[in-house]
Amino acid sequence: MKRESENPRVGPSLALCLFLAAALALAALPPGPAHAASQDELRGVWVPTVLTLSYPSQPTADQAALKRDALAILDGAKDMGFNAVFFQVRPAADALYRSSLFPWSKYLTGVQGQAPSGGFDPLAFMVEAAHERGLQLHAWLNPYRITAEGADNAALADGHPARLHPEWTVLYSDGRLYWNPGEPGVQSLIADGVREIVEGYDVDGIHIDDYFYPGDDFGDAASYAAYGAAYASLADWRRANTETTVRNIHEVTRAAGKGLVFGVSPIGIWANRSNSALGSDTRGSEAYSQKFADTRGWVKRGIMDYVAPQIYWNIGYDIADYATLVDWWADVAEGTGVKLYIGQAAYRSGNSDPASPWHGVAEIRRQLELNRAKAGVSGYIMYSYGSFAGSPELYAMMREMNAAAPAGQEPLPAPTQSDPEPAPFSDMDGHWASEYVALMVGAGVIQGYPDGTFMPDSQIKRGDFVLMAAQAFGFAGAGGGVSESFIDVAPDAYYAKAIAEAKAGGAITGIGDNMFAPETPMTREDMLSMMWRFLVMTGREDARDYPLQPLEPFSDRGAVSGYAAQPMAFFVGRGMLNGDEGRLEPLRYATRAETAAMLSRVTEEFGIGKNGAEPYALDGRSRQP
């Protein structure tokens, strides 16, 4: 967690004076640090605006003062050798940019809803000024916090979304208001807020930090009763909600088509080994059980481009050793294509006690050296800019450590996965599903988007899945036209004919009341159930009485719906579904990449569309060309 209450408040105006002092101190330094930064290392710094910790120096509507503060930060960041600035543009449910969804932040002008003078837009200004200096500018958001101070609960601006939708909010025991992550309206609001930024500003990325559920006593019982029936526990439902937020943001950034990156900076411990065999050798607060954020799983599933765990402890700390956690996260990220940056606690430097590991600046130096010696660590992000502005010694050390690095902007590596196979889409190069997607494109089964992307990690819609399956199986329906399809399938929809034929052939049955919900995401168990029915109805496999024993090794087998048990057992038993570390995750939404992979495996296993094999009708008869 960002330790907001422990960070020194030193404004950019003071920073200008400190820059001069630091520069003089550097004159006596030997040329070149012992461990030079590599050219592709991310060297980031967080610029928090909540409580005006780093920007602005004091709340004001005066655009001239706001510009001076912004330029002081950017000039200082460049001078110290940073190449990326993570600017907090939504410290609560507010904005440091011109938004149609959220009011202007009180931390900017002093009054929530009050705009800066002269039409000034801090985010637009920061982006342009950062790029002029060769720096990346990432928009940093807090997705769930509505108020950072309890006194603000009754002072929300007119038109604030929390005023319009109080049913989406929860007053937590810390006195603050939070969005309820389980409310569909909240999930849409967060995604729309990200979309507003990526479509309106030339940012280099979107970044969220560790504020997920504030604790296990969160008051969301009514939402769980309304939306959580499919989950085995409240905890599983909450983790699904935070994952939905992360997936939605990732999908929005990929859809923007600008080469944007999206990353998360969680608390440094996913789980302690005492609670999970996969956890780290630590004894601290856990993201998985206390924040309901499966941050390790997000990396393994590739639903973000980088992870920046906040490892805010010193090397050798027995409860949570920095070196131990760096090793653990490097192992987690290895082979996933998700970059690993380390979140570091610059704010803890300068302790006056000589016995403290944080005395002076030696600990941060040691940590940087350890990072650069560890394969798999691609950079760091320092919390926070105000710590450097307030300490000439820390400023000088940072400048020294990065002195050998190029001054120009270093673009973040494009998101990759370990599979090197070529792909026909701009966002598939190196993705783990690259080969599967290429095969399915070659077979005419799947298509991408007009901008040349496939968006592999976005959720697959039910209508899209039926269309893909229809094209893979080449089926002909047993009669019936589009007008006899489900009542919520528009006759002119691109997937209407495929859905009508699949319904007529008995391969799909809908969700009840003659509805199919074609535009909603598809769960993994629904995807596998429909694929199994396509196999049965086209005569490929008689699996109606398939034994359920293959499901026994999976810890979440009890979460599999009754109608999906045989299909999932069938695919596990045939070696076509392996699960994820002992879990089937039947209720997680399937991605476009997973759909392509399963369709590829099925067509390979059963010879569909290969070696001149004829496609089948849904009733099992050979379909004539």
Image: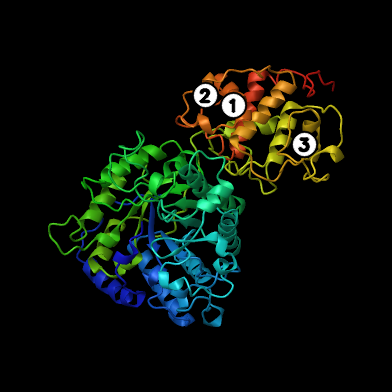
The residue tagged 1 is 565
Residue visible at 58% across and 34% down?
Answer: 434
Mark 2 neighbour class, 10 Å CA radius: few under 14, some 14 to 19, many 20 or more: many
Q: Are marks 1 and 2 in contact (CB under 8 Å)?
A: yes
**Mark-to-mark CA distance, 3 and 1:** 23 Å
Do tag 3 and tag 1 residues touch (Cβ < 8 Å)? no
Residue 604, quarter of picture: top right
Which residue of the protein is positioned furthest toward the left in this rendering?
355
**Nearest the camera: 141 or 27?**
141
Look at the picture and state if 67 lies above or below 48: below
Answer above or below: position of 173 versus 53.
above
Q: As shown in the figure, which amino acid type bears the numbered disc 2?
A: Leu
| Frontmost residue, 489 versus 435 | 489
Measured as percent of width and height from the top left, residue 466 is found at 72, 35
| Above or below 468: residue 305 | below
Dot 1 surroundings within 10 Å: few (below 14), some, or many (20 or more)? many
Distance (Cα) linking label 1 and label 2: 8 Å
Gap in angstroms between the C-alphas marked 3 and 2 = 30 Å
Q: Nearer the viewer, residue 79 or 391?
A: 391
The N terminus lies in quadrant: bottom left
Earlier in the chain: of badge 3 and badge 2, it is: 3
Location of mark 2 (residue):
551
Q: Is residue 134 left or right of residue 313?
A: right
Q: Is residue 28 left or right of residue 134?
A: left
In the rendered image, residue 17, in percent from the top left (x then y), is placed at: 29, 77
Q: What residue lies at 39% left-to-right and 71% top-to-bottom? A: 51
Give the mark nearer the N terminus: 3 vs 1: 3
Marker disc for residue 499: 3
* Amino acid found under the numbered disc labelled 1: Ala
The kind of secondary structure element at disc 2 is helix
At mark 3, the secondary structure is helix
